[in-house]
Image: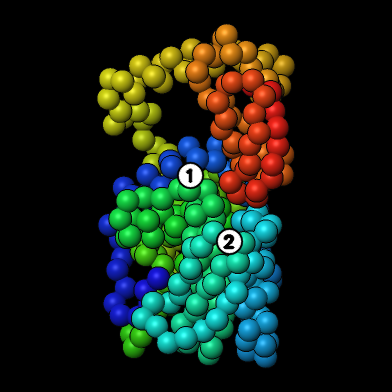
Amino acid sequence: MANGGPVEHGYPHLETVRAAVTALYRRLSYDTVRTFSVSVAPADVAFCDTDDLHLGAQRVARELVRHYRLPDARLIVGFREMTHAANVELAAGPEYFVELNDRFRTHRRDIGAALAHEVAHVYLHRLDLSFPGTRENEILTDTVATYLGAGWLLLDAFREDGASSQKLGYLTPEEFGYVLAKRAVVFGEDPSVWFTSAQAYTAYTKGLALARRDGEQPPLCSAGWVGRRRYARDRRYAQEHSVPDGGRHEVPYSFSPAEHGSLRVAFPCPTCHQRIRVPVRGRVRARCGLCRTVLECDT
């Protein structure tokens, strides 16, 4: 997470951002993403100058671990001189060592923003979700943190005037605003009331305008022949299996191998709702990669 220097604006990483949102839904499922309907509250990550530096940093880290639903993860936060804003050591866990730039000793209001990015690294590490290349992976991390309700802190850390500037994260301010707007559309949430930075609010409004233009685009405008055929097939299937009274189909926990052959089936973890995939081969024992819950099921 770089800070300082001129701030890049616009949407240079927009394609990667959209790919990151798609990858998040494919890995978690729609229902799991919906469990992040509430963003991190400003009061939960507030940091006063009178708070103890290390105890306060640990408190904010615990709150972000709770938000990402990583119950057995423990973050140990330290400070040292470094080029980047923060760094995390992605080990096997459950302890993860996070180092913050020494500048946060006197800029404590932004500690929550730095930790939001680093805890998102731990979350993606547990999910085994990554993009090739360091920069693309950092963009994925910023996007996931923002879409799951913690990244508004990163945009709020953006401040710029005629004499100085500060930005945390690898996305531009407008790209942060775009992802926040996409989240706002899904969850009916208005993050603009939490911003303490006027520049962050301006960037959010620009991102919101682009997100609204996305919603005005015709469906499948850029899809090829295969994508259009798949959409038509899925739409017919949805119409044939719709529930007239507005109810929902429940996904069964047991499947017939004769019907599904060598397929793998998926079901939500009862603890954290992470989607677990197992092969269809009778009774199996599986461990959730996110919360480490062990369960047995008949497939």
Residue 19: where, in percent of width, then height?
37, 44
Name the one closer to the observer, 174 or 127.
127
Q: Residues within 10 Å of mark 1 (few under 14, many from 20)?
A: many
Residue at x-position 48% and y-position 37%: 26
Q: Quadrant of residue 282?
A: top right
Residues 165 and 30: in front is 30
Q: Quadrant of the C terminus?
A: top right
Q: Position of residue 77 (x, y in %)?
A: 57, 77
Locate residue 13, reporting x and y percent.
31, 55
Residue 58 can be seen, yes or no: yes
At mark 1, the secondary structure is: helix
Q: Which residue is mark 1?
A: 24
- Return the x and y of residue 83 as percentages of the image width and height: 36, 81
Q: Is residue 275 above or below residue 1?
A: above
Q: Secondary structure at mark 2?
A: loop
**Within the image, what quadrant is residue 68 found in?**
bottom right
User: Colour scheme of this structure image?
Assistant: rainbow
Q: Is residue 209 visible?
A: no
In the rendered structure, which disc, 2 or 1, sits on the residue that comes first in sequence?
1
**From what the image shows, is residue 229 above or below residue 289?**
above
Residue underneath mark 2: 93
Q: Is residue 75 above or below residue 22?
A: below
Q: Residues within 10 Å of mark 2 (few under 14, many from 20)?
A: some
Residue at the image position 64 percent from the left and 56 percent from the top? 70
Q: Is residue 207 left or right of residue 67?
A: left
Q: Amino acid type of disc 2?
A: Gly
Q: Is residue 18 left or right of residue 253?
A: left
Image quarter in which the N terminus is found? bottom left
As rendered, which of 157 and 148 lies closer to the eye?
148
